[in-house]
Image (cartoon, rainbow, N blue to C red):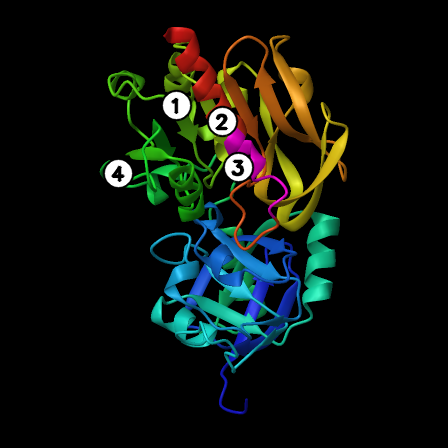
C-alpha cells in the first residue's frame, strides 16, 4: 500500500477526491457515473455502453475474484476510468487468470481507490452525472477541474461509430439453426449473441452505419438492435435507416440503445436522465402481467412516454422513476426493452424477452407460409 502513487479525481463542479492509483498511470476524462452491482465488474469494464464514462462501483470491495477471458463482454475494456472504495489485491477464484489491478494496467485504464465512494455517489445523485477527470500525474485540483470542464459532454455525443465492428461477422447457432438474425452493432455485448445462438439463431453482426437496403437484402428472419453508448439524439441517419426497416415488417427486438433508437424512429423523443440507471437491481413492472422483474441496466437516456404515437404501447415502466422500460408496436412485430435481458452475471428475470423475439419470428414464418 505504501508504494501506491497518489491519484486525484476532480468533477466539473469543483468537487475533488484524493486517493491512490491502482491501475495504469496517466490521466482520463469522461462522464462520471456509478454502478450499484455487487459483482460483474469485468462485465462492466468490457461493456461498450460505458465508452466515454468513468465508472464508480458502489460496492466497497472490488476485484476479489479477479478477471478471466470467459467473462468479457467485448474484446477489451471501454471505460475511460474506474473508481472504487477498496481494490482487492487477492484474486480468490479458481477461474481467475489475473488480478483486476494487473488487468487495468495491461489495458491502460486509469483507476483510483481509497476515496469515499458513498460521498461521491450521493453527490452525483444530488447534482446529476457530470464530467470528471482522474489523474496520477496532475494532482492540482484547479487544473484537473478545468480539464474535466473542457472534456466532451455526453449530450449530443455520438459514440456508436467508435465501438461498432468494422466489418460484418457471423455468430453461428448452437445446434440446429432455426432462424437468421441481423444484429446492428451499436456496442453489442457478447452475451446477447450467446443468448441468440443458444436459441438456434445464426446472427450476422453488422456495423452501425449499414444501410437498411443491405440488411433487407440479407432476407433475415429478424432484426436485433443492440445496446450502445452515447446520446441517441446524435443518431439521426441511423434512425432513418431503422425507420425504413420497421416499415418492412421484419420482426425486430431492440434493447437499451436500440430501444431508444426505435423510440425515435417511431417519432418519439429521448431525454437525459439525471444520473441514469446502472446496476443489477432495478425494479421494472410488466404492465401486461402486472408483475415485477429485477433487472440489469446501463443507460443515461430514456424515451419520453408522452412523445410516442398512439400505435406504440408502453409495456414496462421503472418503479423508481416511472420512465419507459419497454414498448411494442400495436400492429407490427416490434418489441423493445430499455434494460439488459442478456444480463451477465445477472439477474436473469428478463431473459424471457429473447423468447418473445423468437415467438415473433415463428409467427412471421407461419404467416408467410
Q: Quadrant of residue 18?
A: bottom right
Camera-nearest label, 3 or 1: 1
Dot 2, crowdedness within 10 Å: few (<14), some or many (≥20)?
many
Q: Position of residue 252 (x, y in %)?
A: 45, 22
Nearest to N terminus: mark 2 or mark 1: 1
In reply to whether residue 114 is colored magenta, the answer given is no
In space, the residues marked 3 and 1 are separated at their CA atoms by 31 Å
- Which label lies toward us, 3 or 2? 2
The residue pinned by badge 1 equals 222
* Mark 2 or 4, nearer chain start: 4
Task: Tell me what residue is drawn at x 65 percent, y 38 percent.
Answer: 273
Label disc, if present, on residue 170 of the rendered structure: 4
Q: Which residue is mark 2?
A: 357
Residue 232 makes an appearance in the image: no
In 3D space, how far apart are the residues under numbered discs 2 and 1 (Cα atoms)? Answer: 8 Å
Quadrant where the C terminus is found in the figure: top left
Are the residues at dot 2 and dot 1 in contact (C-beta closer than 8 Å)? yes
Q: Is residue 224 visible?
A: yes
Q: Secondary structure at mark 1?
A: strand
- State the extent of the magenta-drawn residues as a range: 348-355
Q: CA distance from mark 3 to mark 4?
A: 33 Å
Q: Quadrant of the N terminus?
A: bottom right
Give the residue at mark 3: 155
Q: CA distance from mark 2 to mark 4?
A: 19 Å
Amino acid at each position: 500500500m505504501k508504494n501506491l502513487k497518489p491519484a486525484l479525481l476532480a468533477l466539473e463542479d469543483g468537487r475533488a477526491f484524493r486517493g491512490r492509483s491502482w491501475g495504469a498511470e496517466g490521466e482520463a476524462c469522461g462522464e462520471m457515473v456509478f454502478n450499484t452491482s455487487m459483482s460483474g465488474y469485468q462485465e462492466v469494464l468490457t461493456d461498450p455502453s460505458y465508452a466515454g464514462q468513468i465508472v464508480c462501483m458502489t460496492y466497497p470491495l472490488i476485484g476479489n475474484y479477479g478477471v478471466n477471458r470467459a467473462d468479457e463482454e467485448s474484446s477489451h475494456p471501454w471505460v475511460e476510468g474506474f473508481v472504487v472504495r477498496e481494490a482487492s489485491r487477492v484474486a480468490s477464484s479458481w477461474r481467475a487468470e489475473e488480478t483486476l489491478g494487473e488487468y487495468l494496467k495491461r489495458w491502460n485504464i486509469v483507476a483510483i481507490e481509497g476515496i469515499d465512494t458513498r460521498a461521491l455517489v450521493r453527490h452525483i445523485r444530488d447534482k446529476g452525472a457530470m464530467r470528471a477527470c482522474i489523474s496520477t500525474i496532475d494532482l492540482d485540483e484547479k487544473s484537473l477541474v478545468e480539464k474535466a470542464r473542457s472534456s466532451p459532454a455526453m449530450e449530443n455525443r455520438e459514440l456508436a461509430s467508435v465501438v461498432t465492428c468494422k466489418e460484418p461477422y457471423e455468430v453461428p447457432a448452437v445446434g440446429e439453426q432455426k432462424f437468421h438474425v441481423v444484429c446492428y452493432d451499436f456496442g453489442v455485448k457478447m452475451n446477447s449473441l450467446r443468448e441468440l445462438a443458444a436459441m438456434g439463431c445464426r446472427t450476422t453482426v453488422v456495423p452501425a452505419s449499414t444501410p437498411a437496403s443491405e440488411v433487407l437484402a440479407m432476407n433475415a428472419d429478424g432484426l436485433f438492435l443492440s445496446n450502445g453508448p452515447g446520446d441517441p439524439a446524435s443518431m439521426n441517419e441511423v434512425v432513418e435507416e431503422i425507420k425504413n426497416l420497421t416499415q418492412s415488417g421484419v420482426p425486430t427486438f431492440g434493447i437499451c440503445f436500440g430501444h431508444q433508437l426505435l423510440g425515435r424512429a417511431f417519432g418519439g423523443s429521448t431525454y437525459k436522465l439525471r444520473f441514469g440507471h446502472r446496476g443489477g437491481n432495478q425494479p421494472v413492472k410488466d404492465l401486461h402481467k402486472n408483475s415485477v422483474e429485477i433487472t440489469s441496466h446501463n443507460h443515461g437516456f430514456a424515451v419520453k412516454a408522452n412523445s410516442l404515437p398512439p400505435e406504440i404501447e408502453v409495456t414496462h415502466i421503472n418503479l423508481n422513476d416511472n420512465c419507459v422500460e419497454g414498448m411494442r408496436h400495436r400492429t407490427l412485430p416490434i418489441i423493445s426493452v430499455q434494460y439488459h435481458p442478456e444480463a451477465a452475471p445477472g439477474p436473469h428475470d428478463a431473459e424471457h424477452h429473447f423468447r418473445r423475439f423468437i415467438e415473433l419470428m415463428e409467427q412471421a414464418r407461419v404467416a408467410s407460409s
